[in-house]
């Protein structure tokens, strides 16, 4: 799966969207609800049955040694990526896609630079998560 994600070569919104989707598959969808619930249960935590993996991950991080702020900081880039998934690939309204692209270009100059920055923040967050959760 790691081989499926690459930095966009151009500033094409289509290429950027494809790579955002691939990165979301790799980084976010890898957190399984069942496993996260098991960590929470083992640490005597509670959760709602309709919570998704990112909310469960945040709770699991707190129960395994991180503060609430540290857990939110670690999950933040994952949430940002996941929120971009649909607009980046035009699965939502065209206006949402235009806004996501404009925001990425405004804050980073190019879509490639945005992707690089997000990838670096994701890597740092995943290091924190990996160091915290039980193996």
Image (cartoon, grey):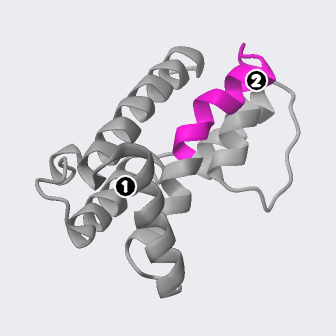
Q: Position of residue 128 (x, y in %)?
A: 52, 19
> What kind of secondary structure does the magenta stretch mostly adopt?
helix
Does 121 appear in magenta? no
Tell me what residue is drawn at x 86 percent, y 53 percent. Answer: 48
Is residue 71 shown above or below 82?
A: above
List the residue tagged with mark 2.
69
Q: Residues within 10 Å of mark 1 (few under 14, many from 20)?
A: some
* 74 to the left or right of 29: right
Tell me what residue is drawn at x 27 percent, y 69 percent. Answer: 13
Q: Position of residue 30 (x, y in %)?
A: 45, 47
Q: Are marks 1 and 2 in contact (CB under 8 Å)?
A: no
Marking on residue 105: 1
Label whose residue precedes the other's in the sequence (1 or 2): 2
Q: Secondary structure at mark 2?
A: helix
Tell me what residue is drawn at x 45 percent, y 20 percent. Answer: 127
Marking on residue 30: none
Q: Quadrant of residue 43?
A: top right
The residues tagged by marks 1 and 2 sit, at their Cα atoms, a distance apart of 28 Å
* 129 to the left or right of 101: right
Q: Secondary structure at mark 1?
A: helix
Q: Which residues are magenta?
A: 61-78
Q: Position of residue 87 (x, y in %)?
A: 47, 72
Does 69 appear in magenta? yes
């Amino acid at each position: 799966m790691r081989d499926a994600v690459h930095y966009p070569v151009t500033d094409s919104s289509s290429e950027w969207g494809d790579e955002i989707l691939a990165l979301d598959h790799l980084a976010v969808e890898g957190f399984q609800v069942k496993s996260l619930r098991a960590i929470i249960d083992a640490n005597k935590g509670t959760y709602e049955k309709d919570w998704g993996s990112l909310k469960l991950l945040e709770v699991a991080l707190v129960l395994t040694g991180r503060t609430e702020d540290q857990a939110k900081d670690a999950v933040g880039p994952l949430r940002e990526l996941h929120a971009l998934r649909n607009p980046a690939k035009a699965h939502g309204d065209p206006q949402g896609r235009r806004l996501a692209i404009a925001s990425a270009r405004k804050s980073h100059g190019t879509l490639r630079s945005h992707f690089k920055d997000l990838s670096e923040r994701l890597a740092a967050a995943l290091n924190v998560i990996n160091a915290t959760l039980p193996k």
